[in-house]
Image (spheres, rainbow, N blue to C red):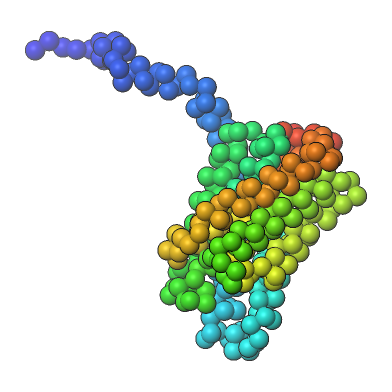
Amino acid sequence: MANVSSSGVAIGLSGSPIAQKLEAAAQNPVLATARRALAKHWRLYLFEASELAIFMFAACAFSVWLFDPASTAARAIPAALLRQVLFAAAMGAVATLIIKSPMGKRSGAHFNPACTLTYLRLGRIAKADAAFYVIAQFLGAIAGVALAVPFFGKTLALPTVRYAASTPGCCGTGGALAAELFMAVSFMAIVLWTAGSSRWSKTTAYLVGLVIALDLIFFGHVSGVGLNPARTFGSAVFADIWTALWVYFLAPVTGMLIAAEIYVRTVGLSGVLCAKIDATSTHPCPFVCSHPGHPHAFE
């Protein structure tokens, strides 16, 4: 039998269809851009996933604590409205803490695909980074609920808890759609108008927390306050509740894009300095950024 050298094998494979496909893939500019983005910003993607995982774990924990009829808090606070207010305040505080955290200051603290896609529309985040952000956010939402399962077990599946799922409430699907659109427009409007203002930028993180809390108080019974496609999906995976899922994907993205369009037409695109929610952050900025106070590199 004739001996075949390794070089011979390499030469033999070089013209094969498989080798040609591999070579074409290696030279694909889209894949090359994705590889560079992943190599440079993988920590940011991990931060985004971690931020939403923390948010979802907190949502599950506070849902169990306040809405499980057998819990100490539920027995001590029989008034459902008061418990909803406490839940809203807790989740608003969690959101603010995430935005102000070292992770949030570095990644921009989007932890919401609708927010990331809006900044993509505004040209403040690269396409590859936006794609990895969205993937990370969905994975983080799932991971956050998964981490809650060992802690709270079957309690998460109770009808009053349901893995903190968002579904249409008292006003049906139409009411949920209207509520989610309103919340998304108002949320992004507050972010854009305050983050782009030297006077108000220090308040953005706190106003975001306040808006989330108010949304949960006033619209919790209408839509469950999704406001975030990844957040809704993470709960739905475990609760196996897919009711009107399209509302919770379409409305947040559409609403935030509407807010962005209004902002651009009234203030101008130049008013969007950066894609960070907390524009006061002095951590290295990975975005398409024109903020004078941001170092423009991620080390």
Task: Kindly give the residue lying farthest to the left in the view shown.
Answer: 1
Q: Please say whether residue 240 is visible from this viewpoint.
A: yes
Return the x and y of residue 73 as percentages of the image width and height: 61, 84
In the image, 219 versus 71, the foreground residue is 219
Q: The C terminus appears in which quarter of the rendering?
A: top right
Relative side of 199 to 280, left or right = right
Residue shown at 66% from the left, 86% from the top: 79
Q: Position of residue 102 (x, y in %)?
A: 70, 51
x then y, percent, for residue 55: 61, 61
Who is closer to the viewer here, 130 or 153? 130
Horizontal side of 132 relative to 91 (left or right) equals left
Q: Is residue 192 above or below residue 63?
A: above
Q: Quadrant of residue 42?
A: top right
Q: Residue 245: x percent and y percent?
A: 50, 57
Q: Residue furthest right?
A: 199
Q: Quadrant of the N terminus?
A: top left
As drawn, is 272 to the left or to the right of 221? right
Q: Is residue 267 left or right of residue 92?
A: right
Residue at image point 25% right, 14% down: 9
Q: Residue at x 30, y 17 (%)?
A: 17
At 52% from the left and 45% from the top, the residue drawn is 135
23 in relation to 149, above or below = above
In this rendering, does residue 100 appear at all?
Answer: no
**In this figure, what is the number of numbered marks?**
0
